[in-house]
Image: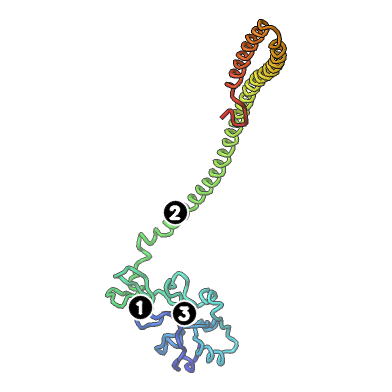
Amino acid sequence: MVTEDISSKKCVCKASSTRRGGDFIHDFSCSPCEENGFNTEAHHYCTKCTIYYCQNCVSKHNVLYKKHAVLGRKDVKKWEAAPGVVDALERCGMHPGEALKLVCGDHDQLCCPVCVAVDHRQCSKIHPIPDVAKGIQRNTEFQQIPKKIAELEKQFELMKEARMKNTTSLKKTRATISDELKTIRKKINEILDKIEKATLQDLDGIIGELEKNIKKDIETCDKMTIELQNMIAAFQTKSKSSESKSYIAYRKSQDMISQANDHLRGISTIECYNTAWYK
């Protein structure tokens, strides 16, 4: 352990932690400084002495005990696990370097001395844990704790298994829905194929009929063109003959013109077909 040379001298190390109500709160406080009434943050821990040290105090310690293993802040997790340090169950959650020693009846909370100094100064029901703990091992509720914990552990295991089954079930559901969608898509494609085939067949029939009518109209146009050409030639010849022949040519020409106009009107009433005719 550290001698009087360390613990009896005042430490002037500047604290770097948060301040509450006039006190600096540290996760780990320098042990020699605390013994001398100073609240200084610890930056080192001696595994041999099982004591925390600030920067000033560790310098003096290292002079006296050169072979002791001293851990720095980078190994702070090893401080909590080192022999002699407060057991994890008994360690204060707010101040890991402090042991739980008191109970606040006003707040029904376990406290370390730092907790009491900072957060429970005005509380009137502060009791040492040994006083409150008398007879606890004979308490029925205390004796039931392991059983309750075991039951909760079992429930969590069952819950985990249920959730794992849910995960498997979700994957199967996803696969089933995917297969159903593929089946529906296949059926839709088959229906569309049938509709396409039937529509094209109907369209081929319509196009064929229209092409037939168009061909007929073209033939009519060719025929009428030839007849009109013949008529004009005959009219010009007959018009220079006797009046009787001219009259006959005149009447036949009138009939031919009337017939030609009827054909034109009949053909012109048929819609011209283009890429948008079906819309």
- Do the numbered discs 3 and 2 sit on residues whose CB atoms are within 8 Å? no
Q: Is residue 179 above or below residue 25?
A: above
Q: Is residue 151 left or right of residue 228?
A: left
Few, some or many residues within 10 Å of mark 1 (<14, 14–19, 20+)? some
- Residue 133, position in %: x, y? 35, 70
Does residue 32 appear left or right of residue 188 in this picture?
A: left
Callout 3 amino acid: Phe
Residue 144 to residue 197: above or below: below
| Residue assigned mark 2 | 151
| Cα distance between the residues tagged 2 and 1 | 38 Å
Q: Residue at x 54, y 79 (%)?
A: 73
Q: Which residue is drawn at the image coordinates 57% and 21% (left, top)? A: 269
Q: Which mark is residue 118?
A: 1
Q: Residue at x 47, y 72 (%)?
A: 87
Task: Point out which mark residue 28 bears.
Answer: 3
Please, what is the three-letter code of the amino acid marked with disc 1? Val
N-terminal label among 3 and 1: 3
As measured in the structure, the alpha-carbon distance from the residue carrying label 3 to the one carrying label 1 is 15 Å
Mark with earlier residue (2, 1) = 1
The 10 Å Cα crowd at callout 2, few under 14, some 14 to 19, many 20 or more, is few
| Rendering quarter of residue 204 | top right
Q: Secondary structure at mark 2?
A: helix
Q: Secondary structure at mark 1?
A: helix
- Marks 3 and 2, how far apart in space? 36 Å
The mark lying in front, picked from 2 and 1, is: 1
Residue at disc 3, secondary structure: loop
Closest to the observer, 170 or 178: 178
Between 137 and 269, the one nearer to me in the picture:
269
| Residue 65, label in figure | none
- Pick the front one: 99 or 38: 38
Chain-order first, disc 3 or disc 2 = 3
